[in-house]
């Protein structure tokens, strides 16, 4: 009997059934989009928290300006001094040293890379691209991961490699493939490079003033050599001057750190490098910080679910009110109200199931993650909650008044 009652109810004024189904589809799509937005917020919040928590980040800069720079480079031992300073920066018990240099690279036009990837085009400089030269600690500090391929390995940093391994930002996946070779120029030296990995979409780093996304960056290993005089001296000077001006992660105060750096520079008889603070960042929206923002997103999804359950229940009640006389006749004929309740529940369940299928097709079309566990949980919740008010109304329905109407 429940099946016949269900079919009859579904066929009665089909446009109302279609409207309820469309309403549920919008609900599930909204919940899925809210979930994906919340998940993204949590992941970005985690990455930002990890990159700014515990240790403080500082930038170390050289103070070689104009004549001082010329005088330093005129010294016969300038390269060995930079090498000693770099060794001290990377091998001491006071802080962790992150090599993070921003020399742009030149890539020949033969690769036909879109102009949106180029930098300094407004100044008439073409085919130059944003690039970072980094060490392993850079990936650890900013939680950088690959969506395809691998990060740098120990041997990748050697100047002895005939082919330099490089990483490309996520946007480059449209232009290149893993294992492709690229010729580029870095610090005036030409290199043959192999693409060993593509970064995950949305990876970012702290450039000292802002969080910068790496989707359009070329990532190079910060090259190292055992014999600094085996390579071109001009190249090595530029390389190690850059390598000495990286980022420091430490629990020390700025004053304590500056004192350490000054002492080391004076011991090498060079102008002391300076320390500057790096801005810390916390994920916010509407003035709400990350942890609170996650709660807001969750409450938003819950409110949507409750409001939609009420709206669906009201529409079903509206259908029942229009069929009030028919339901009264059914009850007068001795049909148990349990049968009616079951038919109403199955109707709402089928409508919700059809809406889930519609939402699933939407996620496929627009490449949105479909969390089936969340959707099924919401579907059963809505089916039950949307069934309760109509069932209560039928239970309290006055048979005498209904038959008189």
Image: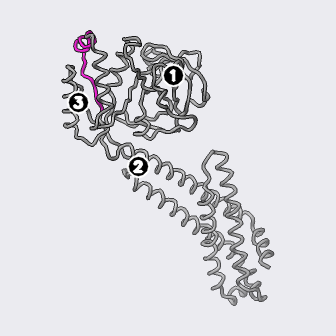
Q: Is residue 75 left or right of residue 404?
A: left
Return the residue nearer the eye: 65 or 305.
65
The residue where tag 1 is placed is 164
State the image coordinates of residue 128 (x, y, percent, origin top left). Answer: 47, 19
Do the CB atoms of the residues marked 3 and 1 lie less than 8 Å apart?
A: no
Q: Which residues are magenta?
A: 59-74
Distance, label 1 to label 2, CA atoms, is 41 Å
Decide: few, some or many residues near mark 3? Use Cα within 10 Å; few <14, some 14-19, many ≥20.
some
Q: Which mark is residue 261?
A: 3
- Indicate whether residue 71 is drawn in magenta: yes
State the image coordinates of residue 365 (x, y, percent, origin top left). Answer: 67, 45
Q: Secondary structure at mark 3?
A: helix
Q: Which mark is residue 285?
A: 2
Distance, label 3 to label 2, CA atoms, is 38 Å
Q: Secondary structure at mark 1?
A: strand
- Mark 1 or mark 2: which is in front? 1
In the picture, residue 206 is in which quadrant? top left
* Looking at the image, residue 373 lies above or below residue 323: above
- Mark 3 or mark 2: which is in front? 3
Return the residue nearer the eye: 169 or 357.
169
Q: Quadrant of the N terminus?
A: bottom right
State the image coordinates of residue 298 (x, y, percent, origin top left). Answer: 48, 59
Q: Is residue 381 left or right of residue 282?
A: right
Q: Secondary structure at mark 2?
A: strand
Name the residue: 25% across, 11% down. 75
């Amino acid at each position: 009997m429940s099946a016949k009652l269900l079919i009859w109810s579904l066929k009665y004024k089909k446009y109302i059934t279609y409207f309820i189904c469309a309403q549920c589809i919008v609900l599930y799509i909204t919940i899925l989009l809210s979930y994906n937005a919340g998940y993204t917020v949590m992941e970005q919040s985690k990455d930002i928290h990890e990159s700014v928590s515990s240790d403080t980040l500082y930038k170390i800069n050289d103070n070689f300006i104009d004549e001082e720079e010329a005088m330093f480079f005129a010294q016969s031992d300038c390269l060995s001094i930079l090498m000693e300073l770099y060794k001290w920066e990377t091998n001491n018990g006071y802080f962790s040293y992150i090599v993070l240099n921003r020399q742009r690279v030149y890539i020949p036009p033969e690769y036909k890379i879109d102009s949106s990837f180029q930098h300094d085009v407004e100044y008439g400089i073409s085919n130059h691209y944003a690039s970072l030269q980094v060490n392993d600690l850079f990936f650890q500090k900013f939680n950088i991961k690959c969506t395809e391929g691998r990060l740098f390995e120990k041997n990748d940093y050697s100047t002895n490699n005939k082919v330099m391994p490089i990483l490309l930002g996520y946007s480059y996946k449209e232009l290149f493939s893993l294992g492709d070779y690229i010729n580029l120029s870095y610090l005036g030296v030409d290199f043959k490079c192999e693409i060993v990995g593509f970064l995950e979409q949305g990876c970012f780093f702290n450039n000292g003033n802002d969080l910068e996304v790496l989707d359009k960056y070329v990532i190079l290993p910060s090259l190292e050599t055992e014999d600094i005089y085996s390579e071109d001296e001009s190249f090595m000077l530029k390389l190690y001057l850059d390598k000495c001006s990286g980022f420091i992660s430490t629990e020390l105060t700025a004053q304590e750190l500056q004192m350490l750096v000054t002492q080391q520079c004076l011991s090498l008889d060079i102008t002391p490098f300076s320390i500057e603070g790096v801005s810390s960042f916390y994920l916010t929206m509407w003035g709400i910080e990350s942890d609170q923002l996650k709660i807001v997103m969750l409450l938003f999804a819950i409110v949507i679910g409750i409001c939609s359950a009420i709206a669906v229940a009201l529409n079903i009640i509206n259908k029942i009110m229009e069929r009030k006389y028919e339901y009264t006749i059914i009850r007068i004929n001795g049909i148990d109200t349990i049968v009616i309740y079951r038919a109403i529940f199955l109707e709402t369940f089928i409508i919700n199931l059809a809406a889930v299928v519609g939402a699933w097709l939407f996620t496929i079309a627009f490449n949105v993650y479909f969390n089936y566990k969340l959707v099924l949980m919401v579907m059963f919740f809505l089916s039950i909650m949307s069934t309760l008010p109509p069932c209560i109304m039928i239970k309290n329905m006055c048979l005498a008044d209904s038959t008189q109407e």
